Image (spheres, grey):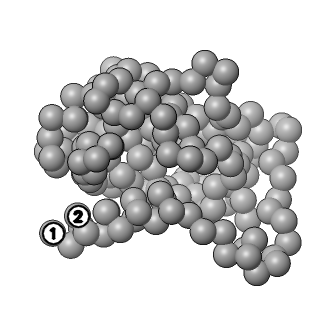
Amino acid sequence: MHSRLLTTFLCLLFLFPVSFAQQSGAPAPEAVPESCPVTKPSDQPFVAPSPYPAMAPKGSFWFGTDGLWTLLGTDPRWPMGQKTFWWRQDWGRYKWIPEEQAAKLTVTARRLDGNAPPADILKSNSSYREQDWKSFLVGGINFSVPGCWEVTGRYEDDEVTYVVWVAK
């Protein structure tokens, strides 16, 4: 029960981000180097299959395939610790994705612009939002160092890979 409440709380934090740094007059965030091929919204964006909403929440975009997709922010800069969200159409029939299904998702991260200790990939847990997202998995990544990182989610034969800039 506590993990479900925590998962829901974390999801709400993601949906309603507040930039305290911008409000406090802190310096502008570091720019993403051109050498880092961060994933950006496409001219032909991925549209989540029904019954999921075609449009992602403001400031984000759906990315992936009909078999597996995620939600990325339009700002490709990530903090050292970040949540990840994953969907599959067949999960929509559940209120909570069964553990044996959730365990099939593997997430990896590797640094593209240099050597780094591995990122700490946190176990993904089931969450649910009736009004739009239905059932999905939410996990986390604690990156070991800043830089250009490739993140890959795999579920059975489906794979989604994207690139983010992890800021200091």
Image spot of residue 27 (x, y percent): 85, 72
**Where is mark 1, residue-wise?**
1
Query: Dot 2: what SS?
Result: helix
The disc labelled 2 sits on which kind of residue? Arg
In this picture, is 112 found above or below 116?
Answer: above
* Residue 87: image location, x then y, percent: 34, 37
- Figure check: 161 above or below 98: above
Q: Tag on residue 24?
A: none
Q: Is residue 38 visible?
A: yes
Q: Are marks 2 and 1 in contact (CB under 8 Å)?
A: yes
Of the 4 image quadrants, the one containing the N terminus is bottom left
Of the pair 159 and 111, the residue shown nearer to us: 159
Q: Is residue 15 above or below residue 51?
A: below
Of all residues shown, which one is farthest toward the bottom?
24
Lateral position of residue 149 relative to residue 30, left or right = left
Per the model, the C-alpha gap separating discs 2 and 1 is 5 Å
Left or right, 75 with reference to 68: right
User: Height in image: 129 above or below 2?
Assistant: above
Which residue is pictured at 85% across the width and 38% down the height?
34
The residue indicated by pointer 2 is 4
As helix, strand or loop, the secondary structure at mark 1 comes to loop
Of the residues shown, which amino acid type is indicated by label 1?
Met
In x, y percent, where is residue 85?
41, 46
